Image (spheres, helix red, strand yellow):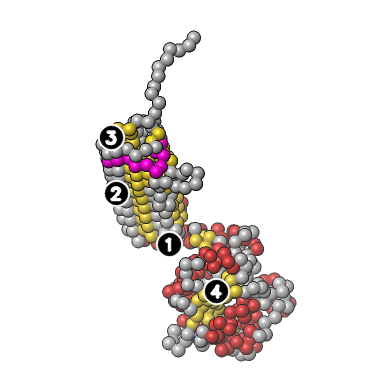
Amino acid sequence: MSARETIGALVLAAGKGTRMHSDKPKVLQELLGAPMLRYVYTALDPLFGEGIWTVIGHKSEMIEQAFANENRNFIHQTEQLGTGHALQTAWDELIESGLSHVLVINGDTPLLPQPRLINFLKESLASNADIGFMTLTLPQPGSFGRVVRHLGDVAAIIEAKDYDESLHGPEPREINAGIYLLKIASVAPLLKRLSNENKSGEYYITDLVGFAVEQQMTVVGVDCGNDPHLLGINNPAELVRSESLLRANLVMEWLEQGVTIHAPEYVRLGPMVTLEPGAVLHGPCELYGTTHVSRGAEIYSNTWIKDSNLAEGCVIHPFSHLEGATVGKNCSAGPYARLRPGAVMEQGSKVGNFVEMKKSVLGEGSKANHFTYLGDAEVGTGVNIGAGTITCNYDGVNKHKTTIEDGAFIGSNTSLVAPVCVGQNALIGAGSVITKDIPENSIAIARARQKNLPKKR
């Protein structure tokens, strides 16, 4: 690509996606826990940086909210009148930006391989194309626009609904992939000619190809074979198909980088998950969001993990659920552990079966082995928490903190009514309801005295 060319990207993301039968805009439909628009940005960002514009329309506020923490250039299409109208809506802003070319891509193409995109840009620019676009050749073209050629040269793109063999000849299997490179100066006068006189009553960006051919401009259709990664998503079946391809690709990438993944066909990894070589996963399991798994950590089957950090040597046993959690070195969680947002396990600590933590810290070497709830709690080092212990952190209006200092021993079936502090090396008798602070090195028993009475006959 020459330095003389200034190329930007325009993502078309305004459509309703009625065939998805969802209340969400189509581009927010998720693959492996991330919206499909996220994948499009991942492919485009390294190439175009801030030179990316996105046309949004249907439920645009949901899209803006989904990317509220990012500096995205959104252009509003108040009426969704087709892809050609979306391009017209964005055109003035593209002109003002000083671009020589614009890449136009549908926001429902999440699997776009970046190397394929780079090659397309190079080939289109090398041909000095006024319009370049990607094509695929499929055994079943379905609802995609058909590419019409005369003696090998592109003549037009005809939408499937409008294809008439009596006018256009035998129906081809070559289809439009919906990815274009447009030379701004050449396409500008063609935009005004777009019409909605077709069966859908929409303005098609594909009509620009026919107009350009009429004007004897250079139009290049870059044949990409039958690469399924270039197919758009229009319905739930296509969403699941693309997600399956993506899942397999991600798992293979991590295997090749030195991560051990047992039963890989049953492992689902989100696009922002990071795994260090030497991490071990056992399928089926699911990891999403910004989860990071360090070398030597091991995750067993039937676990679900999101936005969590797992340190070296930790073990997550089967049927555990982690979200927004931090698990330190050589910790053990599960089976059937639930670590909610803000849960922190420090080095060597342990939570066992049916233990739930929320916004709590379990100190180094401390353990809660069974049937325990720790909410809004700070637990020191070397603490033993007996089965059935509950931190009663909510009074119906506010949350309150429980502090358990180093070396304390909490007897089974204890209720700690916050706010409360258990001092260092204190011991609580089983079955106690603790409502007051306990000094260090003290024993606390808060239960009714046992009485043994003669049995009535």
Distance from label 2 to label 4 (Cα)?
45 Å
Q: Which residue is mark 1?
A: 272
Q: Nearer the viewer, mark 1 or mark 4?
A: 4
- On the image, the x and y values in percent for residue 42 come to 46, 69
Which disc is residue 74 wearing? Answer: 4
Upstream in the sequence, badge 3 or badge 1? 1
Q: Looking at numbered disc 1 in the image, what kind of residue is underneath it?
A: Met
Question: In terms of secondary structure, where does tag 4 sit?
Answer: strand
Residue bearing the label numbered 2: 347
Region of the chain picked out in magenta, as a range: 415-424
Mark 3 lies on residue: 442
Under mark 2, the amino acid is Gln
Secondary structure found at label 3? loop
Q: Residue at left 59%, top 61%? A: 24
Q: CA distance from mark 3 to mark 2?
A: 27 Å
Nearer to the camera, 319 or 352: 352
Q: Earlier in the sequence, mark 4 or mark 3?
A: 4
